[in-house]
Image: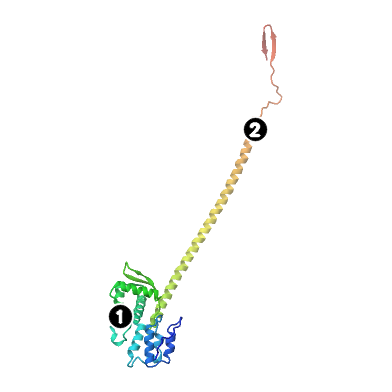
Amino acid sequence: MVSDKPATSSNNPLEQFVLLAKSAKGAACLELIKQVLEAPGVHVFGELLDMPNVSELQNGAHSSYYNTLNLFAYGTYRQYIENKDKLLELGPAQKKKLQYLTIVTLATRTKCIPYSVLLEELDIKNVRDLEDLIIEAIYADIIQGKLDQKNSQLEVDYAIGRDFRPGDVGVIVSTLQDWCNACDAVLGCVEVQIQRANTEKNKVVKHKEVIEQEIVNIKKTLKTQAQSQVLDTDEAMTTDSREALPGTEKGKKPAKAKGVRSSGSVKLQR
């Protein structure tokens, strides 16, 4: 009989239980199942279900142990309420763990879970208790999200993984293929946008080069015109200076006035 709870591995808390199940039989195996259902940090149970000593309980007098372990692996709290006669009576810690796992299952269906659905699936009577349970699940890193009290819903950003049945492999593959196809489509759109952006960039660069060349040409033209205007101004100033200098006609002398004396007056003659 297993009397002490086994130490759990930080990477795989279920590992120690699986190792013990290899040799645990009879009452020891039953006690091991009860412990794993209550152990914190253990949220997957598929490996333990596959152990021969556990699997043989399925059809025996202790089938309720196997059924309860199977419920924790794949089921929900609502299924526990509906099938109590075939299952073990759960303690407070075990009930809370199954409620956590039920939230995880609901999160795989929709990222925004209405309070009304949670209240029904978890068999909780009031919103206050529901929000306390959700907060505990968040602090336990089972889910990540936030309470939307305005819209009375839980918004889930992340949830831990649960066990999946062998028959669910096809659904998982199909879901992953759809996701890959969506990624390819998004990648194609991104590549198209990149090509368009590069084309527009090249157009802008060429247009900029044309404008810059036009600016250079305009500067050259303005410089040439300025130099031409300076030359014209210098020539005009030289011409004006020459015209302003006093000069006489060649071979001509300025006329002189002769004075003729006369009695009492001077008469000028030319």
135, above or below 4, in the image = above
Q: Say whether marks 2 and 1 touch (CB < 8 Å).
A: no
Residue ID at (53%, 53%): 211
Where disc 1 sits, the SS reads helix
Image quadrant of residue 171?
bottom left
Residue 43 lies in quadrant:
bottom left
The answer to whether 162 is drawn above or below residue 154 in the figure is below
Answer yes or no: is residue 239 visible.
yes
Q: Is residue 163 left or right of residue 125?
A: right
Label annotation for residue 78: 1
Which x, y percent locates residue 250? Answer: 70, 26
Q: Where is residue 221 drawn, in percent x and y?
A: 58, 47
Which residue occupies the foreground of this view, 216 or 270? 216
Q: Give the quadrant of the N terminus.
A: bottom left
Residue 19 placed where, x, y %?
44, 88
Residue 110 visible in the current orientation: no
254 or 54: nearer the viewer: 54
Identify which amino acid the numbered label 2 is placed on. Answer: Ser
The residue where tag 2 is placed is 241
Mark 2 surroundings: few (<14), some (14-19) or many (≥20) residues within 10 A = few
| Element type where label 2 sits in the image | helix
Q: Amino acid at mark 1?
A: Arg
Query: How busy is the neighbourhood of tag 1: few (under 14 within 10 Å), some, or many (20 plus)?
Result: some
Mark-to-mark CA distance, 2 and 1: 115 Å
Q: Which mark is residue 189?
A: none
Considering every residue shown, the one lying at the far right of the view is 251
Image quarter of the C terminus: top right
Q: Quadrant of residue 209?
A: bottom right
